Amino acid sequence: MKTFLVTTSMICISAAVLSGCTSDSSSQMPPMASTQPLMDESVPPAARSACLAAVSNTTNNGDVQITEMIFSEANSQVTVDVGPTRAPWRCLVSNSGVVANVMSLTNEGSL
């Protein structure tokens, strides 16, 4: 009889613990972040222009287009696509238009 009470108690405790588990929307994984590029209009026009010029000069290609802008008080980040293949380049720039860094985001392999 004692074993029966212990087993029954364990079943009751297990059921009480498991009853807290639900399948409502609060227990589901949150949706994935959007893969859409950010176009933060807070990036000043001077910073945008400086990045377009810097990437154009670095690549020796005037076919440049901004595809993403992320504002930061320190340095904003501007992604620029270049040429007919739309090769991506990243530009870090102060909000007054001083370019800190320009770099290719393309895997150039052994080039």
Image: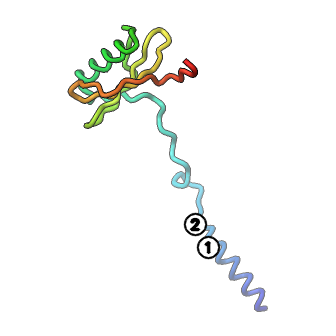
Secondary element under disc 2, as helix, strand or loop, is: loop
> Which residue in the protein does label 2 denote?
20
**Left or right side of 47 for 18:** right
Question: Residue at left 29%, top 33%?
Answer: 75
The location of residue 70, given as percent across then percent down, is 34, 31
Question: Residue at left 53%, top 20%?
Answer: 108
Observer-nearest of 4 and 59: 59
Q: Residues within 10 Å of mark 2 (few under 14, many from 20)?
A: few
Tell me the number on the disc at residue 33: none
> Which residue in the protein does label 1 denote?
16
Q: Determine the image quadrant of residue 53.
A: top left
Q: Amino acid at mark 1?
A: Ala
Observer-nearest of 106 and 43: 106
Quarter holding the C terminus?
top right
Q: Are marks 2 and 1 in contact (CB under 8 Å)?
A: yes
The location of residue 8, given as percent across then percent down, is 72, 81
Quarter holding the N terminus?
bottom right
Question: Residue at left 32%, top 17%?
Answer: 54
Q: Residues within 10 Å of mark 1 (few under 14, many from 20)?
A: few
Q: Determine the image quadrant of residue 76.
A: top left
Q: CA distance from mark 2 to mark 1?
A: 7 Å
Q: Which residue is at the far bottom?
A: 2
Whether 27 is drawn above or below 41: the answer is below
The location of residue 38, given as percent across then percent down, is 39, 29
Observer-nearest of 107 and 67: 107
Q: Amino acid at mark 2?
A: Gly
Whether 71 is drawn above or below 46: the answer is below
Question: Residue at left 59%, top 55%?
Answer: 23
Q: Which residue is at the far front?
A: 110
